[in-house]
Amino acid sequence: MKHKRSRGISILEALITLVVAALGLLSFVVMQSRLRANSDVSKQRSEAVRIAQENMENLRAFGTLASDGTVANNLAYNTGVVDAAAAKTVLASAVSTATNTAYTLTQSVTTSAQAGMKDIRITVAWKDRNNVDQQAVLRSVINGNDPRFAAALSIPPSGSPIKDPLGRDLRVPIPAKDLGDGTSVFKPDASGALAFVFNNDTGAITSKCTAVSTSLATAQLGTADLASAGCTSVNGLLLSGHVRFSVGSTPDAGSPNDAPQALSMRIDLDATTPATGTVGTTAQLAAAAWPTAAQAVVTTGYTAPDCGTQQSKTVRFATPVNWSQTNNNTVQTVTSTFITAVVPVATALTAAGVAPHVNLPAASITGLSDLGERFVAYTCVIYPRDMGGVMAWTGRSMLVPAGWTVGSTAATFKVCRYSEDYNLNGYVWITSGTTVTAIDNAEHPYAYLKANIGLNNQNFLVIKGNNACPTDGATEVNGTGGENYTNETTVSHQIG
């Protein structure tokens, strides 16, 4: 007889299946519990690190080195950055995301072997949900520098950020002799007894020497020569430039190299009380505020300026050098170089004549040539006074002819000045006769207003009195114009 085949599952099979499923669910619950615990510890650890960092930064924010009771809420490095007297409890409400966790912070400070430094150890401890001890430790070093030094970082450096080829401030005259001690010396007149010492970093004039040997040129001077040269400390600002001559029927502002006439410089300092509301404004630069050209006035409160002039020319020569470099495994060697120098116009065009002005032995000067440039180099040192907390001066520079006359006829001469909105900051020079109503000091105005830095390249052009001051030529644009990359704009300065 045949047996019927069983259908469905037995109770035993069902129980086994249930047990297996229960074990799987239990494992999942355990895993979820551990994930939540680990997530909770991770969050607590982040909070602990933040608490430690906050405490560390509080220590870094000390206000003084020593205790100072006059400073409110001050933390002193010597008395505040020390071991904590006792551990402190940081409640959960003190952290960014509140939890039921309470943290215990301990602070340990020891003096480092390095002078002026302290080793900091901050420990933040807590118990997790499983009552297991956890902790985060942060260590660092705090240097005991006076916080006042940090404020010095916000003070802009003195002088120009751009240096000349010798690494000096641009307001130090290029022919000045570097003395090797952070200063340079310069004689406005090579045969004179007056010299000035400049700070190489700031361009400020720090000393005035009135008894320099008249037989020594600037390039020959050294610190020993100044030791007995009657040098005194001063606070001076430079005003310098060139006076060039172009006395043909059509004046040339680009290459004016006619023979210079004898002249001296005069500085008229602000001698009148400006009209109400014009003090310290461009309206104070009006010509009406100044004395006539025949007068030279030094206002009470100023020290009289010092000016010197030198009729000059440029020369070029070769001199031996020893320089080499390797480029693509090829050694390139240079044994001579060309130098361009400014020398007094009366200097003989010989190696012996030029040598004293370039501080080179005559035997090392070869191939000497005259470049044909002629001009008067002028140097004025003006001693500023306090103008509302700023040491500055307000004044006007004027040419004083020697043997020639300023006027408006062909037999006389007109003085023009190179002047334009060179820095393109939107100031436009506007002239009415000799009055300039808007221009920066460095752009050579008719008169300087509250000048508080040295000013160079304040250049003049002397032309025939019956000619107009030349303006800039056409600028080269896409090859359609002349190659004119120099601003040659001039305006009237002295017309008689």
Image (cartoon, helix red, strand yellow):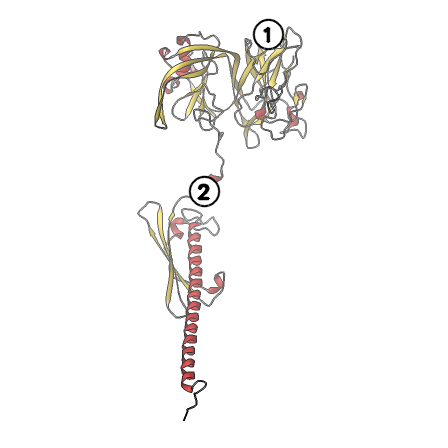
Return the x and y of residue 206 as percentages of the image width and height. Answer: 45, 25
Tell which circle, 1 or 2, labels the residue nearer the N-terminal end: 2
Circle 2 packing at 10 Å, graded few (<14), some (14-19), many (20+), is: few
Amino acid, disc 1: Trp
Amino acid, disc 2: Ala
Residue 17: name its quadrant: bottom left
Q: Report which residue position mark 2 lands on.
A: 150
Label 1 and label 2: CA atoms lie apart by 58 Å
Instruction: Give me the residue at 38% from left, 25% from top.
Output: 181
Return the x and y of residue 485 as percentages of the image width and height. Answer: 57, 22
Numbered disc 2: secondary structure: helix
Q: Report which residue position mark 1 lands on.
A: 404
Is any atom of residue 215 visible in this view? Answer: no
Give left or right: position of 407 versus 202: right
Is any atom of residue 93 visible in this view? Answer: yes
Q: Considering depth in this image, is 461 or 473 the residue closer to the camera?
A: 473
Outermost residue to the front: 1
Q: Considering depth in this image, is 400 or 367 the residue closer to the camera?
A: 367
Relative height, residue 155 to residue 313 (above, below): below
Instruction: Give me the residue at 47% from left, 7% from top.
Output: 346
